[in-house]
């Protein structure tokens, strides 16, 4: 999920039920936390350039030390996998060409994600298109509720949606958005699970990285969850977290309020 209020979602969601360990905001510390894990859920605040740079440096440190994980992207829909693979065959080292062929959505700041793609191409690491397509998520949002999702998880996701959208959504919109969020978690889990044996790092928003209600709920193997947050209070249900400086941005709740009025 990539709502306009991505910057404030984690503050609204923090549960503190899980005793997360704070890491220094250094590439070495972050690489050490990832080392040896079969699946790493590596969170982010989507528009925070400092966090992206730190994660890219940490992954490079990990790879230079000998690790060869697949790198999975929330930012690529699963339907783009064939195009990504063909782009790699046609132009093995062309990051811009790969993003263009995969039809990366304009809503993502691709300058922040290209260093990860470049690292994968440089070391011939698998690039995994992991996310549910927007059209599929919209279909699920408007379909009848699934019966195989625990009611407690549904309630938690609905509360997260309300808080993550600054309590501005119409009540009738909340259940569908929550269902779409669960569906994205499940799709991300299905995408990365086949790569667990070699190791895989999923680049994703902090909400998907949560251990209590995110991707890990749908995995059959253990995972390591790491959040990169902008405030200590946002360090909720993760194994590890890193606090970075806050990105400069307009008030996301005010931006959402204006958007909804339009």
Image: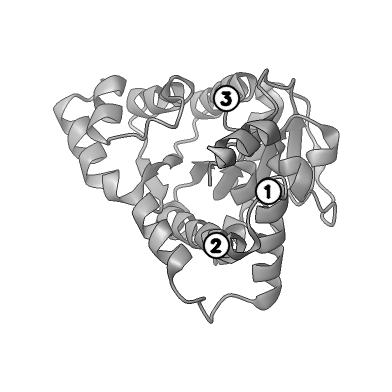
Q: Is residue 217 left or right of residue 128?
A: right
User: Which tag is nearer the camera, tag 2 or tag 3?
Assistant: 2
Relative to the observer, which residue lies in front, 40 or 47? 47
The answer to which quarter of the image holds residue 246 is top right
Q: Residues within 10 Å of mark 3 (few under 14, many from 20)?
A: many
**From mark 1 to mark 2, how far is it between C-alphas?**
20 Å
Q: Residue at x 68, y 47 (%)?
A: 164
**Does dot 1 land on a helix, a strand or a loop?**
loop
Task: From the top left corner, tell me how far across and down residue 31 is, in percent.
Answer: 63, 30
> Which residue is under mark 2?
182
Q: Of all residues shown, which one is farthest toward the front?
A: 261
* Residues at discs 3 and 1 in contact (Cβ within 8 Å): no
- What residue is rendered at 41% in x and 55% in y? 191
x, y (%) of residue 151?
A: 67, 77
Which element carries disc 3, helix, strand or loop?
A: helix
**Mark 3 or mark 1, earlier in chain:** 3
- Please tell me whether mark 3 or mark 1 is closer to you in this view: 1
> CA separation, marks 2 and 3?
25 Å
Q: Nearer the viewer, residue 242 or 261?
A: 261
Horizontally, residue 168 falls left or right of residue 36, namely right
Which residue is label 3 attached to?
52
Q: Secondary structure at mark 2?
A: helix
Q: How is the image coloured?
A: one colour
Q: Residues within 10 Å of mark 1 (few under 14, many from 20)?
A: few
Which residue matches tag 1?
A: 168
Q: Is residue 93 visible?
A: no
Q: Callout 2 environment at 10 Å: few (<14), some (14 to 19), or many (20+)?
A: many
Question: Residues under labels 3 and 1: Cα distance?
Answer: 29 Å
């Amino acid at each position: 999920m990539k709502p306009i209020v991505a910057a404030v979602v984690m503050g609204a969601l923090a549960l503190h039920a899980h005793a997360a360990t704070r890491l220094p905001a250094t590439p070495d510390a972050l690489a050490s936390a990832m080392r040896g894990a079969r699946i790493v859920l590596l969170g982010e605040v989507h528009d925070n350039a400092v966090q992206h740079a730190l994660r890219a440096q940490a992954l490079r440190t990990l790879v230079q030390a000998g690790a060869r994980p697949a790198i999975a992207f929330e930012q690529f829909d699963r339907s783009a996998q064939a195009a990504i693979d063909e782009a790699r065959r046609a132009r093995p080292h062309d990051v811009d060409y790969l993003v263009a062929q995969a039809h990366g959505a304009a809503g993502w700041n691709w300058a922040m994600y290209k260093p990860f793609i470049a690292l994968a191409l440089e070391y011939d690491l698998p690039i995994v298109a992991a996310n549910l397509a927007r059209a599929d998520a919209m279909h699920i949002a408007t379909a009848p509720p699934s019966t195989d999702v625990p009611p407690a998880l549904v309630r938690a996701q609905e509360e997260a949606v309300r808080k993550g959208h600054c309590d501005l959504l119409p009540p009738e919109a909340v259940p569908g958005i929550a269902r779409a969020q669960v569906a994205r978690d499940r799709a991300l889990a299905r995408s990365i699970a086949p790569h667990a044996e070699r190791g895989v790092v999923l680049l994703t928003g902090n909400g998907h990285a949560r251990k209590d209600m995110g991707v890990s709920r749908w995995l059959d193997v253990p995972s390591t969850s790491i959040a990169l947050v902008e405030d200590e209070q946002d360090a909720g249900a993760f194994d590890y977290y890193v606090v970075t400086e806050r990105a400069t941005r307009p008030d996301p709740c005010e931006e959402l309020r204006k958007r909804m009025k339009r």
